[in-house]
Image: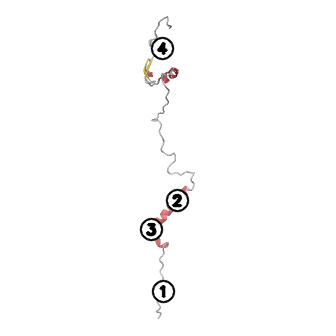
Amino acid sequence: CTVKTGCKKTCASADLDCYVLDNNGFIILSEKAEQTGMFFGQADGTIMDSLVQDGIYKKISIMDHQGACVDTKSNMNRGSYSCSKPWQPLAWFARWLFGHLIWLSMQFHLTPLWEPHFTSAQEDGNDE
């Protein structure tokens, strides 16, 4: 169409695809029902790029934090130990052994072994 012919372009034309977009670039109305609600950049990326270059839309990168989960669980099993500390099982065993020896001494009243109370006998001097 030219200015001289005076034709008007409408959405009824087979040559045009018409869309109604919201302020964020999502399709509100389309000739194809499956495109409704879709981001316009997915439907026609080249036209969306030209709309951004013309300053009609602004490109904003966002991160969907709902889909990003931090794994708080450790990959290491609690029953295993790290190879970076090979002395750790020995320390655990020493702590266990010390605790059990203390428990054993309390159960059998073995405290006199390290605190002996010696008795001494003495003659009284009356040897008859």
Q: Earlier in the sequence, mark 3 or mark 1?
A: 3
As helix, strand or loop, the secondary structure at mark 3 comes to helix
Residue 76: percent from the left, percent from the top?
52, 47
The answer to the question of whether label 3 and label 4 lie on touching residues, with beta carbons closer than 8 A, is: no
**For discs 1 and 2, the disc positioned in front in the rendered view:** 1
Based on the displayed image, in which of its 4 quarters is residue 33 positioned?
top left
- Per the image, the residue denoted by label 4 is 16
At label 4, the amino acid type is Leu
- Per the image, the residue denoted by label 2 is 93
Cα–Cα span, label 1 and label 4: 126 Å
As helix, strand or loop, the secondary structure at mark 4 comes to loop
The answer to the question of whether label 1 and label 4 lie on touching residues, with beta carbons closer than 8 A, is: no
**For discs 1 and 4, the disc positioned in front in the rendered view:** 4
Mark 4 crowd level (few <14, some 14–19, many ≥20, 10 Å Cα): few
Report the colour scheme: secondary structure
- Per the image, the residue denoted by label 3 is 106
At label 2, the amino acid type is Phe
Q: Earlier in the sequence, mark 1 or mark 2?
A: 2
Cα–Cα span, label 1 and label 2: 48 Å
- Per the image, the residue denoted by label 1 is 122
**Would you place residue 58 above or below residue 76 in this image?**
above
Residue 66: percent from the left, percent from the top?
45, 35
